[in-house]
Image: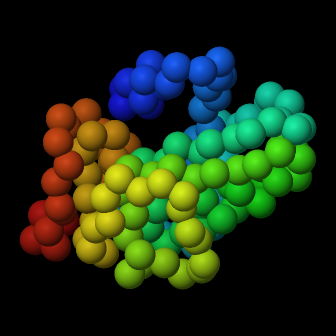
Amino acid sequence: CSSDLLFRAIDIDAEISFIRLKSYEGTSTTGVVKQVLGLSENLEGRDVIVVEDIIDTGNTIKKLVADLKEKNPASIRIATLLFKPESLQCEVNPDYVGFAIPPKFIIGFGLDLDGLARNLRDIYVLHDDNL
């Protein structure tokens, strides 16, 4: 898992938690962010780094940050492997970006299409003729 590799590269005392949110059906956003797996840890006064695979419309990360702020952390930073600035529907400014990419639907390397293709070893653009 790529998050495991990232976490192993950190050389300070840190904890890791996983949250799963869903806002896509097929290749389109639903506009509704659903929490599939939640957070139970106390974040009060703690520094939080959200590690995201992709920021597309920005709606999911905006909702997550709003929910995390209710837990009174000392700070929240956002790191994302992939960022689609042309697809943003709300203001989101990630602190750390691996790659800015065009507004194409991508799969693989943990990114899915209705639960499928996460296990592909690389990232692929899904062309309209593949749908």
Q: Is residue 23 visible?
A: no
How are the colours assigned in the image? rainbow
Drawn side of residue 124 relative to residue 38, left or right = left
Residue 123 x, y percent position in the rendering: 20, 49
Which residue, as the protein is rendered here, is positioned at the far front? 11
Q: Where's the C terminus, which quadrant?
A: bottom left
Drawn side of residue 42 relative to residue 8, left or right = right
Q: Is residue 68 above or below residue 86?
A: above
Please state which of residues 29 and 69 is positioned toward the viewer in this rendering.
69
Q: Is residue 57 above or below residue 7?
A: below
Residue occupying image coordinates x 10% and y 71%: 129
Drawn side of residue 79 relative to residue 111, left or right = right
Please state which of residues 11 and 90 is positioned toward the viewer in this rendering.
11
**How many numbered circles are shown?**
0
Please state which of residues 114 and 33 is positioned toward the viewer in this rendering.
33
Q: Is residue 53 above or below residue 92?
A: above
Residue occupying image coordinates x 28% and y 67%: 101
Residue 118 x, y percent position in the rendering: 30, 39
Which residue, as the protein is rendered here, is positioned at the far left? 129
Q: Is residue 129 above or below residue 60?
A: below
Residue 57 x, y percent position in the rendering: 49, 72
Q: Is residue 17 visible?
A: yes
Q: Report which quarter residue 125 is drawn in.
A: bottom left
Residue occupying image coordinates x 86% and y 31%: 42
Q: Where's the N terminus, which quadrant?
A: top left
Residue occupying image coordinates x 58% and y 53%: 78
